Amino acid sequence: MLLLGIEAKIKKPPLSIEDLTDLAFNQESVMVSSSLKLDKYISCCVTYRGNVGLENAIITVNNLKTLRNFKAVDWCPTGFKTGITYRDAVNSTKANEVGILINSTNFARIFERELQKFDRLYRLRSFVYAFIFEGMEEREFSEARENLETVKNDHEEINQFSEENYEAD
């Protein structure tokens, strides 16, 4: 007998905390194109939501650090912060969720690409009129570029400092 118009509801079991965390650190899940295997972590925040035990979360993060061979900068021994929100999201149908926020030495390359794009657009004066029309002063463009250059240089220095210490050990 064939019933039309009735969907079979297949319930998938919720992913374990280990699986969720592994998926979050998967290269396809990262929003900014980067190679996390080549660079060093400056800091990382892992936040869980839902029915997650603190001990389980800490064990999962520690296992992740050892299995994935995370390279962290020398001057930040912990590198990881773990947070748990026990209340479910308002409009979420998922049992558990995880979010990560990472700062790594890779951002120096990303900032360099963005600086090159900015320079190209600014040389052509693209969209400058729109910002000036909204009240932005022209000197703010050069200040913003200098600030981004400073952040990029800081990330490069951190990477060089870490590599020098790594080679000395």
Image (spheres, rainbow, N blue to C red):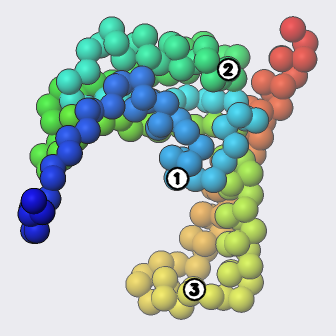
Give the side of residue 4 with respect to residue 152, left or right: left
Query: Are circles 2 and 1 on residues that touch, CB within 8 Å?
Result: no
Element type where label 1 sits in the image:
loop
Mark 2 or 3, closer to the camera: 2
- Above or below, 17 against 23 in this view is above
Name the residue: 70% across, 72% down: 117
Mark 1 or mark 3, whichever is nearer to me: 1
Which of the two discs, 2 and 3, labels the residue nearer the N terminus?
A: 2
Alpha carbons under labels 2 and 3: distance apart: 45 Å
- Which image quarter holds the C terminus? top right
Numbered badge on residue 128: 3
Question: As shown in the figure, which amino acid type bears the numbered disc 2?
Answer: Asn
Note whether residue 137 is visible.
yes
> Residue type at mark 3?
Val
Residue count near mark 1 (Cα–Cα under 10 Å), binned few <14, some 14–19, many ≥20: few
Q: Residue at x 55, y 39 (%)?
A: 26
Distance from the alpha carbon under mark 1 to that under mark 3: 28 Å
Q: Residue furthest front?
A: 1
Q: Nearer the viewer, residue 13 or 46?
A: 13
Query: Which of marks 3 and 1 precedes in the sequence?
Result: 1
Tell me the residue at 14%/31% (across/down): 87
- Residue 96 seen anywhere in this rendered image of the structure: no
Please tell me how crowded label 3 is: few (under 14), some (14-19), or many (20+) other residues with Cα within 10 Å: some
Q: Please state, as top left, top right, bottom left or bottom right, where the N terminus lies in the image.
A: bottom left
Of the pair 118 and 41, the residue shown nearer to us: 41
Q: Position of residue 45 (x, y in %)?
A: 45, 30
**Would you identify the image quadrant in which residue 55 lies?**
top left
Where does the image place residue 17, in percent across and percent down from the top left? 36, 24
Looking at the image, which residue is at 74% across and 79% down?
120
**Residue placed under numbered mark 2 in the picture:** 69
